[in-house]
Image (cartoon, helix red, strand yellow):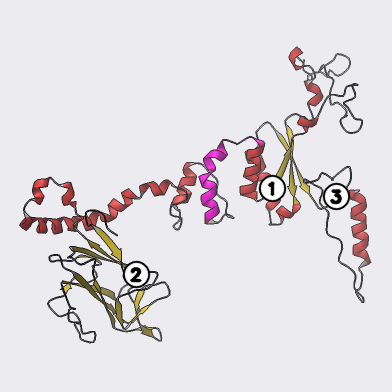
Amino acid sequence: MSDKRGIGHFYLNAANQWPSFQLHDLDVDTDGSIVIKNTGGTFFDRGVFLAGPFQLGPGKTAWFRLRAIADRLPQGAHVHLFAAAIDSGSPPFQPNDEDPFADAAWQGKPLDVLDVLIEGPATKLLWLGGILRSDGNTSARVRQMRVDYGRDTYLQFLPAIYGKDPDSTEFLERFLALEQSVLGGLEKTIRDLPLLFDPYAAPAGDFPSWLEWLAGWLDFDISDFWSIPEFRQHLAHAFHLYGKRGTIEGLRQYLKIYAGVEAHIVEPGAYTNIWTLDGKSSLGFTTMLAPSHADGAVLDSTATLDRSYLTRTEEFGAALFLDVAHHFCVWLYCADLARPGALENAKAVIEREKPAHTVCHVCVIKPRMRVGAQARVGIDAIVADGPEPAQLGMQLDTGVLVAKAEECRKEA
């Protein structure tokens, strides 16, 4: 890939394959890394590779930089890189010699330096070579290699006068490339800084990970049961979820992401009316005993010393709803509470997220459909599986049957 200035790069490992590579005493591991061969757990002394030729068109290319991306070199493992920029043919290469790249066409780079410059004028072809050495106990792992071409250096940021002299420009570009190789990692970190604030892109491998830092900045609690994709999704919606705190929908979402349960939340006060003789009240359904007098404290009737209060005119009738005001019920399916401690976890979420002045009743919906008590379609009308059918020769445990019958009688 390149831009309109003829500056670009290409990679040499394509889908864990290394096309144009000749490997001698080297293997491609299952993860696509080049490693030294070994027999019985002992590595060869060395392995050699030759790659090329690489050509970007009919004209000449200003080859610039070679970078080998590898794991940190363990003690006893070494990498030695070589490059040959020529116009035709191939440079001499003897893989079995002590120095396979002894010919003058090869540019030898410092030992264990994985980011090197390709020197010389523009040429048509580029050949690459390398030697991996081992003490027999370990091997370097080269995962990828990248070739940069064109002069993408800091010279572009200097005044134009520094690029007028062709004789000095070559030296100046290579001199600046030394600083660029040192500061390149810092530049990439600055360029990628916005990714650290994106829940879908922030790194999550280390501890504490950037995801945990982001959660801490939002004061967003983390669950040990979340997978990394779930963590990212919940964190991305944390700000919007905060806007729903103290609401029915907000509590339902908190129970879903922290306790893994689907909840039905009901406020009894929303379905409670004053009984009036106008045909709208149904005995046994919309009628109930009032917990207090509509006027509040009444002398010689409901007033108790030091335990009474006066009702203002605008609050007339409020005392009738004292037992349902600020109360709500959370219905949970028992099938969602199979995980150990799930019910306690759900109650802890409710206690943490409900408004402080409210009282919550947690009700577990079990697979028992009872007309008049548990028969709301889509909510608690759940038919349980029948008992296992009896088989010929099976010994029935009458004690268990009696216990189950007694349990059903008590529930009824």
Compared to residue 98, the image places residue 80 above or below, namely: above
Tell me the quarter of the picture where residue 171 sits.
bottom left
- Camera-side residue of 175 and 5: 5
The stretch drawn in magenta includes residue 238: yes
Residue at x-position 28% and y-position 52%: 186
Q: From the top left corner, tell me how far across and down residue 217 is, in percent.
A: 46, 42
Q: Is residue 165 left or right of residue 339?
A: left
Q: Amino acid at mark 1?
A: Glu
Which of pointers 1 and 3 lies earlier in the amino acid sequence? 1
User: Magenta span covers which residues?
Assistant: 229-247
As measured in the structure, the alpha-carbon distance from the residue carrying label 2 to the one carrying label 3 is 63 Å
Q: Is residue 63 left or right of residue 40?
A: left
- Alpha-carbon distance for marks 1 and 3? 19 Å
401 left or right of 45 in image: right
Residue occupying the point 5% across, 58% down: 167
- Circle 1 crowding by C-alpha within 10 Å: few under 14, some 14–19, many from 20: some
Which disc is residue 262 wearing? 1
User: How many numbered marks are there?
Assistant: 3
How far is the residue under mark 2 from the one under mark 1? 48 Å
Residue 216 visible? The answer is yes
Task: Find residue 77 and report its image quarter.
Answer: bottom left
Q: Is residue 298 magenta?
A: no
Per the image, label 2 sits on a secondary structure element best described as loop
Residue behind mark 3? 369
Q: Position of residue 85 (x, y in %)?
A: 17, 70
Amino acid type at mark 3: Met
Q: Is residue 110 visible?
A: no
Which label belongs to residue 13?
Answer: 2
Helix, strand or loop at mark 1: loop
For the residues carrying marks 2 and 1, which lies nearer the camera in this image? 2
